[in-house]
Image (cartoon, helix red, strand yellow):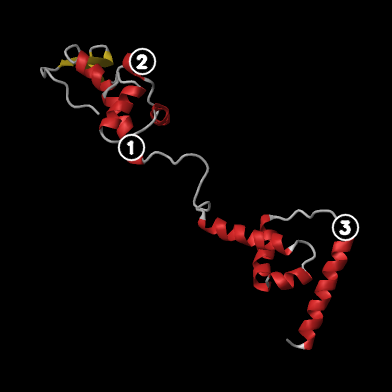
């Protein structure tokens, strides 16, 4: 090491001592980033030299910070997010399909059907999925008729109607006639309505 670098290091050591004298016995709060930076540098220096130069934090604390950084690197916390993982989109689609096709089934009945298919979900999860998709609980689903069910049950009574207007010359002049007509279907089954 050349003489100039040695003088710089001596100055920094003395500056740290003066800083420690100014602070006294108060503990300094360090941010996680500051701990990380100090721990990374401390590991390169080593415990013996740290005992001579470290004034803000003890060498044991610096090396403990370094061990925590290494442990955090491998504990999987970087990949974790808050809360439970969201239910897969395929499972959510299956839940909504079962609820729509079986309108009288409640959350627990849907839960049982899913368990038979090999999917284990809590009934609260099923309730959340249905709520997110705008599907009401079983009692309300039963009371409300879908458009397909309405057409199926009233097909025999449904009659198509329409009207049009036409201008006609009469002895009194130009008159507008409104033509209203009805059409009845001879088909006994409704077309598929989705």
Mark number, residue 51: none
Alpha-carbon span between mark 3 and mark 1: 61 Å
Residue 112 rendering spot, x and y as whole percentages: 30, 26
Residue 75 rendering spot, x and y as whole percentages: 51, 54
Quarter of the view holding residue 154: top left
Q: Report crowding for label 3: few under 14, some 14 to 19, many 20 or more residues within 10 A (C-alpha).
A: few
Mark found first going from the N terminus, 2 or 3: 3
Alpha-carbon span between mark 2 and mark 3: 71 Å
Residue 66 left/right relative to 145:
right
Q: Which circle, 2 or 1, is nearer the viewer?
A: 1
Mark number, residue 91: 1
- The residue located at (80%, 65%) in the rendering is 55
Alpha-carbon span between mark 2 and mark 1: 23 Å
Residue tagged 3:
24
Q: Tell me if residue 162 can be seen.
A: no
Residue tagged 2:
139
Quarter of the view holding residue 65: bottom right
Give the position of the N terminus as an image quadrant.
Answer: bottom right
Mark found first going from the N terminus, 3 or 1: 3
Question: Is residue 61 or residue 30 the one in the foreground?
Answer: 61
Q: Which circle, 3 or 1, is nearer the viewer?
A: 3
Residue 45 rendering spot, x and y as whole percentages: 68, 73
Badge 3 element: loop
- The residue located at (40%, 31%) in the rendering is 129
- 184 relative to 70, above or below: above
Q: Are marks 2 and 1 in contact (CB under 8 Å)?
A: no
Badge 1 element: helix
- The residue located at (27%, 11%) in the rendering is 172
């Amino acid at each position: 090491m050349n003489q100039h670098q040695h003088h710089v290091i001596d100055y920094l050591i003395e500056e740290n001592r003066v800083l420690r004298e100014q602070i006294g016995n108060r503990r300094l709060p360090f941010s996680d980033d500051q701990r990380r930076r100090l721990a990374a540098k401390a590991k390169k220096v080593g415990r013996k030299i740290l005992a001579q130069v470290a004034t803000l934090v003890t060498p044991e604390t610096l090396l403990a910070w370094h061990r925590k950084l290494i442990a955090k690197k491998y504990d999987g916390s970087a990949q974790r997010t808050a809360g439970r993982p969201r239910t897969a989109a395929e499972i959510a689609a299956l839940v909504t399909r079962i609820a729509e096709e079986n309108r009288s089934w409640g959350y627990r009945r849907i839960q049982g059907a899913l368990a038979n298919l090999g999917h284990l979900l809590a009934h609260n999860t099923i309730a959340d999925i249905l709520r997110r998709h705008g599907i009401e609980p079983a009692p309300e689903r039963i009371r409300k008729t879908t458009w397909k069910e309405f057409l199926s049950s009233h097909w025999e009574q449904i009659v198509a109607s329409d009207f049009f207007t036409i201008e006609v010359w009469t002895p009194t002049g130009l008159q507008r006639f409104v033509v209203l007509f009805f059409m009845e279907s001879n088909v006994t089954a409704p077309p598929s309505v989705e």
